[in-house]
């Protein structure tokens, strides 16, 4: 009979160790981690937050603060340890901006969700820092912008080549006139 509680403690301890390992991987590999207070959120509201985070390429995790603090030891974002008091939720993503955007937008819509701060690698973020990060372009937006810049000259050349011969002739005559004038 006394073996059953001992077995339950072992399972609980194994589960806690697994959770600490999972949290440690999150803290190690995330581009940004945002810590928020979620007192009073309904299950439906929390599911909405999770869905938004997933759509943006991030995740939401509620974990015991004590276990999260253990997982933070020796990690680049260990500075968020002081934020882990009360009912906290972690919003995180590999993209250094996605989780901050989701958390910031959700906090604007739901007053029960309050951002406490976060970390971007080794850099601690206060509430204003999380807001500033949320306003930065995401990785996908940056890539699209760079591709647009690279592709613009090529599309101009392709447009000129694909233009009717009269357009090309007028372009060439304008270039010739400029050359003669110089």
Image (spheres, rainbow, N blue to C red):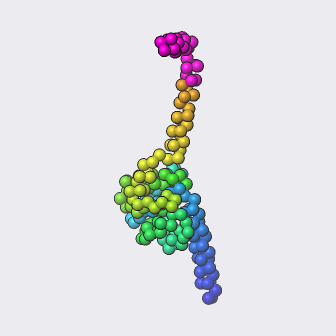
Q: Is residue 33 visible?
A: no
Q: Position of residue 16 (x, y in %)?
A: 58, 73
The dominant secondary structure in magenta is helix
Q: In which image quadrant can residue 153 be found?
A: top right
Instruction: Please provide the residue range marked out in magenta.
Output: 157-182
Residue at position x 49%, y 58% from top? 120
Residue at position x 62%, y 75% from top? 14
Residue at position x 48%, y 15% from top? 182
Q: Which residue is most to the bottom?
A: 2
Q: Is residue 140 above or below residue 148?
A: below
Quadrant (top left/top right/bottom left/bottom right) for the N terminus:
bottom right
21 on left or right of 133: right
Residue at position x 42%, y 56% from top? 130
Residue situated in front as seen by the camera: 96 or 4: 96
Residue 164 is inside the magenta segment: yes
Q: Is residue 14 visible?
A: yes
Q: Is residue 160 above or below residue 67?
A: above
* Total numbered circles: 0
28 on left or right of 136: right
Q: Position of residue 112 (x, y in %)?
A: 37, 61
Residue situated in front as seen by the camera: 120 or 173: 173
Q: Position of residue 125 (x, y in %)?
A: 43, 60
Residue 84 is inside the magenta segment: no
Q: Position of residue 29 (x, y in %)?
A: 57, 59
Q: Which residue is most to the front?
A: 182
């Amino acid at each position: 009979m006394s073996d059953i509680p001992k077995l339950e403690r072992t399972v609980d301890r194994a589960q806690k160790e697994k959770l600490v390992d999972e949290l440690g991987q999150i803290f190690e590999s995330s581009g940004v981690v945002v810590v928020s207070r979620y007192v009073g959120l309904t299950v439906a509201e929390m599911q909405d937050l999770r869905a938004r985070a997933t759509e943006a390429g991030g995740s939401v995790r509620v974990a015991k603060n004590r276990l999260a603090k253990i997982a933070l030891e020796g990690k680049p974002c260990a500075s968020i340890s002081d934020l882990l008091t009360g009912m906290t939720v972690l919003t995180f993503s590999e993209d250094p901006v996605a989780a901050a955007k989701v958390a910031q937008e959700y906090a604007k819509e739901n007053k029960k969700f309050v951002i406490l701060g976060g970390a971007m690698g080794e850099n601690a973020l206060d509430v204003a820092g999380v807001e500033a990060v949320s306003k930065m372009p995401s990785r996908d937006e940056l890539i699209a912008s760079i591709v647009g810049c690279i592709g613009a000259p090529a599309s101009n050349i392709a447009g000129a080549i694909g233009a009717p011969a009269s357009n090309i002739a007028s372009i060439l005559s304008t270039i010739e006139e400029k050359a003669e004038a110089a």
